[in-house]
Amino acid sequence: MSSIHYKLKSTLEYKTLTFDGLHISVDDLKKMICDKENIRTESFDLILTNTHTKRQYNSEDLSSQLVRDCAKNTRENALKLPKVQDTSTSGIVNRNAGVQSKESTHISSEDYAKMSEEEKLDHVKQQSTQKYHSDNFNKKTSGILTGPPPPTYVCNRCSQPGHWFKACPLLNTKRTTGIPMEELMETTPDDPQAMLHPSGKYVVQIRHYLARLNKKTETVGGGGGTPKETEDVKEIPPELSCRLCKNLLKEAMLAVCVEIALC
C-alpha cells in the first residue's frame, strides 16, 4: 500500500489518500481525489502542484518517476506547508562553542572495590562536585548592545547617531515629563538643576530658580557675622542701667560714697 498526502486550497488540514501498488497516474489520482471529496468531474478539474518546486502536473501520461516525486508533495492547488514549531528542543540551553564539558568519570563496582581508601574518597569528592565545575557554567547573554552601531542608527533619546541608546551621554539627564512649559525657563547645560526639554533645550523650573535666588540674597545680606540691629529696641530705664557700661545692671553693687548702683 502506498499513500499520497494532499490538501485542498479551501481547507486547513492535510488528508491522506491510499492506493494499491507503487505507481499511480495523474488521471487516476485526480479521480480518487474527486471521489473522496465528492467533486463532480463534469464541472470541475483538478490541478496538481508540487509544493516545493511549484510545478504543475497536467500531463496524463507521466512515468512512474512522477509518482515517486509527488508521493508526499502533490497537492490540489497546494499552498506552502504550515509552519510547525518544534518543541522537541524546548527549554534546552545551547552550550557555548568554546566550552566543553568534562566526560563522566564513573567507574564500575569492580574497579571501585579495588581502589584504596584514599582513592575512593578522592573519587567520591570528584563526583560530588562534577556538576558544579566551571566547564558547566553558561554565561548569560547581556541585553546591552555592543559594538559600533550602523550608520543609519539614530539614538531615540538625543536624536544623534554614533552610539547606542544604552550608551547615550544624556542617559542620566532629567526630563521635563509632566511639567508645563509655563513653569519652565531656559538655562545652561552646566546648571545642576537643568532638565532636557523635548525641543533639545536645557530648562529649569521657575520656582526652583526663584527659591535659589532668594537663598543667595539672604546669604549675601546677612554676611559679616554681626546680628542685625533693629530700630524698635526698647530703652533701658535709668534706674536699671549701669552708669559705667550703659547696659542693664548685672550683679549690681551699691557705691555708698556716691549712692549709685554699678555692675
Image: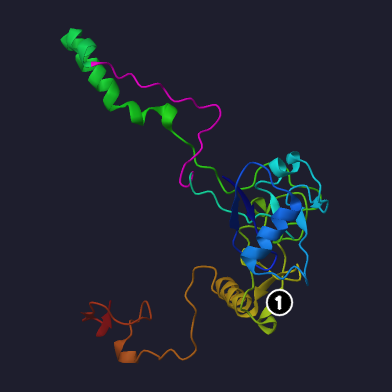
Q: Residue at x 56, y 74 (%)?
A: 215
Q: Residue shown at 65%/64% (left/top)?
A: 35
- The residue at 72%/71% (across/down) is 40
User: Is residue 148 highlighted in magenta?
Assistant: no
Please name whichever residue, 235 or 98, is drawn nearer the observer in this view of the structure.
Answer: 98
Q: Which residues are magenta?
A: 89-108
Q: Is residue 79 visible?
A: no
Between residues 145 and 107, which one lies in front from this camera angle? Answer: 107
Image location (x, y in percent) of residue 24: 69, 47
Helix, strand or loop: magenta stretch: loop
Residue 21: x and y in percent read 62, 43
Residue 169: % across, % down = 68, 53
Residue 200 vs residue 76, the one in the foreground: 76
Describe residue 184's horizontal placement relative to residue 13 as left or right. right
Badge 1 element: strand
Say whether residue 91 is magenta: yes
User: Does the rendering let one see residue 176?
Assistant: yes
Quadrant in which the C terminus is drawn: bottom left
The answer to whether residue 211 is above or below residue 128 is below
Q: Mark 1 sits on what residue? A: 185
Depth check, front residue: 45 or 91: 45
Is residue 33 rendered to the left or right of residue 47?
left
Quadrant in the picture for the N terminus: top right
Question: Of the residues shown, which amino acid type is indicated by label 1?
Answer: Met
